Image (spheres, helix red, strand yellow):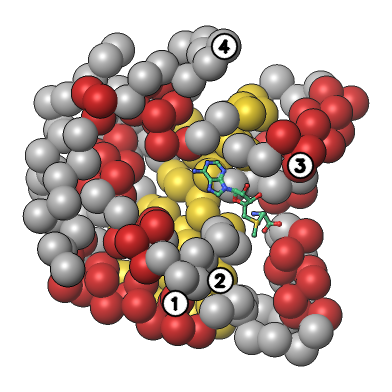
Amino acid sequence: MNTTKERKFKPGKLFEPRDFKRPIIQQEQYLEIGAGKGMHAMQFAQANPDKHLIAIERTRAKFDVFAERAEDLSLNNLQAVHADAIPWVVHALPPQSLSGVFLLYPNPEPKNASQRWLNMPFFEFLISRMKPNVSLLLVTNIEEYFKEAIEVNGQTWKLEAEASEVPRDSARTHFEIKYLARGETCYQLKLTKPQHYKTDFDEWSLI
Ligand SMILES: C[S@@+](CC[C@H](N)C(=O)[O-])C[C@H]1O[C@@H](n2cnc3c(N)ncnc32)[C@H](O)[C@@H]1O
């Protein structure tokens, strides 16, 4: 199998998402991919009024619940987006625009290793959208996924890695609550982009 870096990401081939509206990117701009029904996104926005979060969810039914709850809360620092995050990020975000990224309990695609976030060529593009010294948080209940992410980061992406277990009383997302209630261990990988990190997409922008 070709390595992730050999399977180069080609952002220019991705069409603009349907009904795409270009967001106004804020100074303290955070991104959550796979926000589900938005529990973490709404808690984050309420707890951090000085930060702005764009939270993307692809599945219509989950997004509808998220969008309705977010509207009731009228948080002016949260934007809920219904889209596939990959083309959306390509069309919406300039390089070095994000102050943080959340990937909380992503679907690990057990049968398709190349569809896991750190194995995707898109991951380099995502890193290029992060400012230096900011972190991406990957959280999972699947130990093999966690270990593989640490290994792929060490071999390919070389971001600064900090691994830990999620405290048993944490309750950031619906999936986290479910897994911890079942007595499972959940794992967290904090990946920080070093100051002078380079990607092949640092100059690539549609904005
Ligand atoms: C297992 S759920 C976790 C949801 C939420 N983060 C939680 O912890 O409760 C993973 C979510 O990621 C979403 N997702 C997966 N790939 C995505 C993509 N490319 N763009 C947007 N959402 C995606 C799925 O639709 C699904 O709702």
Specify whether residue 27 is in view: no
Question: Between tags 2 and 3, which lies in front?
Answer: 3
Check the image and report above or below for 81 versus 169: above
Question: Which residue is tagged 2?
Answer: 140
Q: Which residue shows up at 40% across the image and 57% down it?
A: 115
- SS at badge 2: strand
The location of residue 10, given as percent across then percent down, is: 20, 34
Q: CA distance from mark 1 to mark 3?
A: 25 Å
- SS at badge 3: helix
Q: Are marks 2 and 4 in contact (CB under 8 Å)?
A: no
The quarter of the displayed image where residue 166 is located? bottom right
Mark earlier in primary sequence (1, 3): 3
Quadrant of the image containing the C terminus:
top left
What amino acid type should be assigned to the residue bearing mark 2? Thr
Question: Which residue is tagged 3?
Answer: 62
The location of residue 23, given as percent across then percent down, is: 50, 15
Q: Which residue shows up at 41% across the image and 65% down it?
A: 112
The quarter of the displayed image where residue 63 is located? top right
What amino acid type should be assigned to the residue bearing mark 1? Phe
Mark earlier in primary sequence (2, 1): 2
Q: Are marks 2 and 1 in contact (CB under 8 Å)?
A: yes
The location of residue 121, given as percent across then percent down, is: 24, 50
Question: Which residue is tagged 1?
Answer: 146
Q: CA distance from mark 2 to mark 3?
A: 19 Å
What amino acid type should be assigned to the residue bearing mark 4? Asp
What amino acid type should be assigned to the residue bearing mark 3? Lys
Q: How many marks?
A: 4
